Amino acid sequence: MELNELPAKIEGLDKKITQLQAVVASPDFFQQEQTKINDKLKELSDAQKDLEKAYERWAELDNL
């Protein structure tokens, strides 16, 4: 069951990361409040960690 759900979760995280990377790459991103910058960078970092964990879990389940 979990193995079947992981591709959709990974796809969603990929999309979220792509969107966040576009926000961070925008020319005016670093001209806003520092707290907003930090929040968005943390959100991106968390999404990247979640994606890594999802891939690790997929590999783990695939080997069972």
Image (spheres, rainbow, N blue to C red):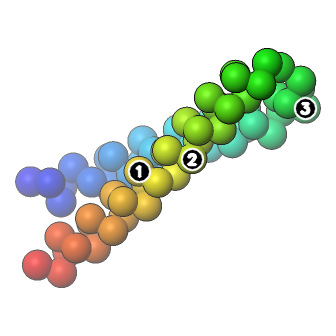
Work out whether mark 3 precedes mark 2 in sequence or the reverse, and give the earlier one: 3
Residue at (36% x, 64% y) in the render: 55
Count residues near mark 2 (Cα–Cα under 10 Å), then give few for <14, some for 14-19, many for 20+. some
Q: Which mark is residue 27?
A: 3
Q: Quadrant of the C terminus?
A: bottom left
- Of helix, strand and loop, which one carries label 3? loop
Residue 38 location (% of width, % of height): 68, 32
- What amino acid does circle 2 point to? Ser
Q: Which residue is mark 2?
A: 45
Relative to the observer, which residue lies in front, 2 or 41?
41
- Give the percent coordinates (x, y) of residue 60: 22, 73
Q: Residues within 10 Å of mark 3 (few under 14, many from 20)?
A: few
Across and down, in percent, residue 30 comes to 85, 30
Left/right placement of residue 7 relative to residue 34 reads: left
* Quadrant of the image occupied by residue 39: top right
Label 1 to label 3, Cα distance in Å? Answer: 27 Å
Secondary structure state at the residue bearing disc 2: helix
Point 89% across, 24% down: residue: 31
Which image quadrant for residue 36? top right
Q: Amino acid at mark 1?
A: Asp
Question: Percent from the top left, x then y, of residue 59?
Answer: 28, 73
Q: Is residue 44 above or below residue 10?
A: above
Q: In the image, which disc is placed on residue 50?
A: 1
Q: Is residue 62 above or below residue 2?
A: below
Instruction: Indicate the amino acid at tag 3.
Output: Pro
